[in-house]
Amino acid sequence: MNISLISLVKRYPWIQNIIGSIYVRCPAMMEHNLGKYHALKKAFYLTALENLHGDYLEFGVFTGGSFVFATKAHRTTCGVSKVTTAFFGFDSFKGFGAQAAEDMHPFYTDQNFAVCEKRIVSNIKKQTKHEKVTLVSGFFEKTLSHDPSLYGIKAARIIFIDCDLKDPALLALRFSRQLIQKGTILMMDDFYSYRGAPDLGVSGAYNQFLHENSQISTRRLFDYGYGGVGVIFTAV
């Protein structure tokens, strides 16, 4: 830090008070989303750098913010490598539906996560008209019971799991199993929910998935936002 700046802060501590007062008023959700967008940009850049062809899969589209951003991040990294990517989003748009007892959480409720599907889908299609986009509506126990090839998915470039609960996250990971290749990046939101319990929520789904597939190995790639984690598959 510049010496003159240190002297200024020492002499006028109210400067830090003002900065702190402004920063603390920034909504946590906004900070998290900015971190998530930065992470998505990293994921697209790194996979483009490796010329990793495959599709983008997002489980838990919600309002479509990250899904739309993903298409923009893809376009900005096309100059690095002409990677072919289609975009697939999976969501019920009605919240979580029936939940297992272990998935119960005071914030992850239908009331908080049900959205107007028609409005969300319309906005996504408008914002992503230059990309190949498929949105699959319905609860995961039905939509992820099919073989991925029935949706036209052959390989995954980036997988983004933002469905909060263990059961749907595990369904998403199992659905993606045959699509994962060396270099695929997996992003997981809310990794430390349920008070950090490693066997619950998205973290529990990820750990169980690795236990079921012992031949798979990953490396921690980055953390982002408020509890988001990104890993890269090094062996499949």
Image (spheres, rainbow, N blue to C red):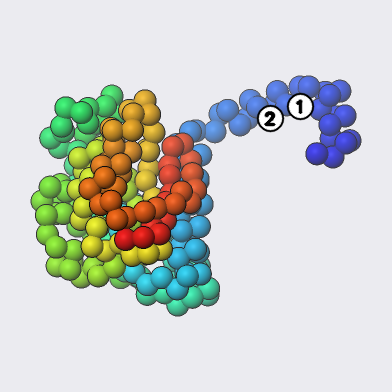
Residue 66 seen in this snapshot: no
Residue 162 seen in this snapshot: yes
The label on residue 15 is: 1
Q: Give yes or no for contact between labels 1 and 2 (Cβ–Cβ under 8 Å).
A: yes
Q: Residue flagged by tag 2: what amino acid is it?
A: Ile
On-image quarter of the N terminus: top right
On-image quarter of the C terminus: bottom left
Helix or strand or loop: what does disc 1 sit on?
helix
The percent coordinates of residue 173 (x first, y second) are 25, 51
The percent coordinates of residue 142 (x first, y second) are 10, 51
Label 2, residues with CA under 10 Å away: few <14, some 14-19, many ≥20: few
Label 1, residues with CA under 10 Å away: few <14, some 14-19, many ≥20: few
* Picture quadrant of residue 116: top left
The percent coordinates of residue 27 (x first, y second) are 49, 33
**In the image, residue 22 above or below residue 66:** above
Q: Residue furthest front?
A: 215
Helix or strand or loop: what does disc 2 sit on?
helix
Q: As rendered, which of 3 and 206 lies closer to the eye?
A: 206
The label on residue 189 is: none
Q: In the rendered image, which residue does mark 2 sit on?
A: 19
Q: As rendered, which of 59 and 11 lies closer to the eye?
A: 59
In the displayed structure image, the side of residue 161 where residue 45 appears, left or right:
right
Residue depicted at x 51% and y 69%: 49
